[in-house]
Amino acid sequence: MLLETTNLSKSIGPKDLFKDLTFTIDTREKIALIGRNGQGKTTLLKILAGEDTDFDGTVITRKNLRVTLTKQEHIEDTQQSALTYILKSVPDYYSLEKILHDFERGLLTDIPRYSEALERFAQNGYFYKKDLILGTLSGFQISNEQSQLPLSKLSGGEKRYVELTRLMYSQSDLFLIDEPTNHMDYLGKEQFISWMKEIRESVVIVTHDRDVLKHVTKIIELKDKKLSVYDGNYDQYIAQNATQTTNSVKLYSDQLNRLKEARKRVEWGLQMRAKSKAWKIRYEHWLRDYEKIKAETVKPSFWIDQNSVESLDKRVLDSYHKFKEKNISIAIHTTKERVSDLISVKKLSLGYSTPLFSGITFSLKNDDRMLIKGRNGAGKTTIVRTILSLTKQKVPSAKQMTGEIKLGTRLRIGEYEQEISEKYLLMSLEEAIVLYYSEMGIPMEDRQVKSLLAQYLFDPIIDGRQKIINLSGGQKARFQLIKMFAAKPNLLILDEPTNHLDLPSIEELEKALSAFGGGILYISHDTYFINQMGGEVIEI
């Protein structure tokens, strides 16, 4: 046993995130922690890592257990270099290096202390550690020059590779990993999955990346402030969850019927209790029975994946749709318009000082789906940003070396960006929505904003007042969806849209996009999403 929790509970203000969680983490386990956005998964990782100590319950770890927690975003100390950030996680690297440097400069004269440090430095292979780290980063397409830059200068994908490299060299017993594959390209994700499968250390990973979930040994779902444990990988979780949820739907439906009958008896007894003492006693007994059943009838959160839903019989299906957990509701423009090409690209070459690529040719019409595939840095996002700049009559940051880009005369684009524009970050969610809609020429009244927030699973009052910068990754993703569909677009440009979304939200997005009447140009490394979307592939 590496780690054990008992009755772990956490609240933020009046809101309970989870209550009385009891579980263990054993050696060599590969555990995925899943759950709806905002359930407290990242908070739970911070508690297990010892970064959050404001909780009830106990966390017991094995003696001398070394734990490494990754970050979703590098918010603090972004001026340190990637190399420095990684070396800080190598046990005692900097403290031993300082002793050696101090001795060489004459600042330390303690020969036994120097000798011990030199021996440990050599035994751990620390004389070659920087070169090994730089080699690993190079394999992730991060050059030696980039490794010396502040973390703030790196892209989202590059930061993910820095995190993965930090894990590899941290010599930890337990890795707590938060959304590691967001912004990774397909080869990077394959490398991460291969590393995770091969290591002997234990892993707890917060992810809704179904490609990763296929390779874990256990899935723990945080739902209704409790934990449900499923042995096996994603496919086994889907099967077990469908069976358990179907049984829960039937049980809840039966409880509601019992409650309905008990209420009828109470209403009847209320009318009859004045007739005699016997009727009064009977009424009081029925009332106690009703209150007991009412207390026991608590609606769980129900979610079954779409493939399993299609196999349910009609009676269970009707009950499931009646009681299932509320999901985001995406209002899409499904009407097919009579337009010529939405976009036409011929023999395109884009770059900065030198071309990133050349000879790219494609066109998009209504109903077309097109995937842009390539490694990070190949130019996928450059194509997208250039098209978006042209639609806004702005000069693109990339140079158009050769070729042409033609935009349809009636083109309306909805975009899903990897990162939210800085101008929104310090605004409240309500303010950001009103601003974006006004930029689209669409006035928004307060009641419309609140209705839109509820449609995307935000609390119209509490969440609406939160600053964008303080929202969770999943909440930021839902804000991106609100923006994308604002102006009834006939072309969607999606840059990694499944990052940060939970499983039910991903399925709802896939369902909405399947019904979308316009064209879709997308970048994704989620093979499940790609299989669902289909379309042509432009590989850079």
Image (cartoon, helix red, strand yellow):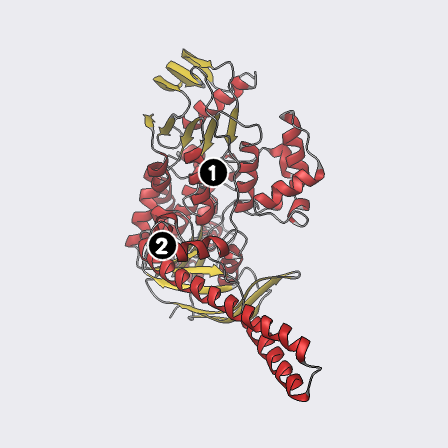
The secondary element bearing badge 1 is classed as helix
- Residue 531 in the image, given as x and y percentages of width and height: 33, 38
Around disc 1, counting alpha carbons within 10 Å, would you say few (fewer than 14), some (14 to 19), or many (20 or more)? some
The residue depicted at 52 percent of the width and 58 percent of the height is 46
Specify the quadrant of the image occupied by residue 132: top left
| Mark found first going from the N terminus, 1 or 2 | 1
Instruction: Find the distance from the CA under tag 1 to the CA under tag 2.
Output: 41 Å
- Residue 337 in the image, given as x and y percentages of width and height: 47, 21
* Quadrant of image for the C terminus: top left
- Residue 28 in the image, given as x and y percentages of width and height: 32, 62
Q: Which label lies toward us, 1 or 2?
A: 2
The amino acid type found where label 2 is placed reads Leu
Residue position marked by numbered label 2 in the rendering: 312
* Residue 468 can be seen, yes or no: no
As drawn, is 281 to the left or to the right of 346?
right
As drawn, is 28 to the left or to the right of 53?
left
Residue position marked by numbered label 1 in the rendering: 156
Around disc 2, counting alpha carbons within 10 Å, would you say few (fewer than 14), some (14 to 19), or many (20 or more)? some
The amino acid type found where label 1 is placed reads Gly
The residue depicted at 64 percent of the width and 82 percent of the height is 284
The secondary element bearing badge 2 is classed as loop
In the picture shown, does residue 201 fall above or below 483?
A: below
* Quadrant of image for the N terminus: bottom left
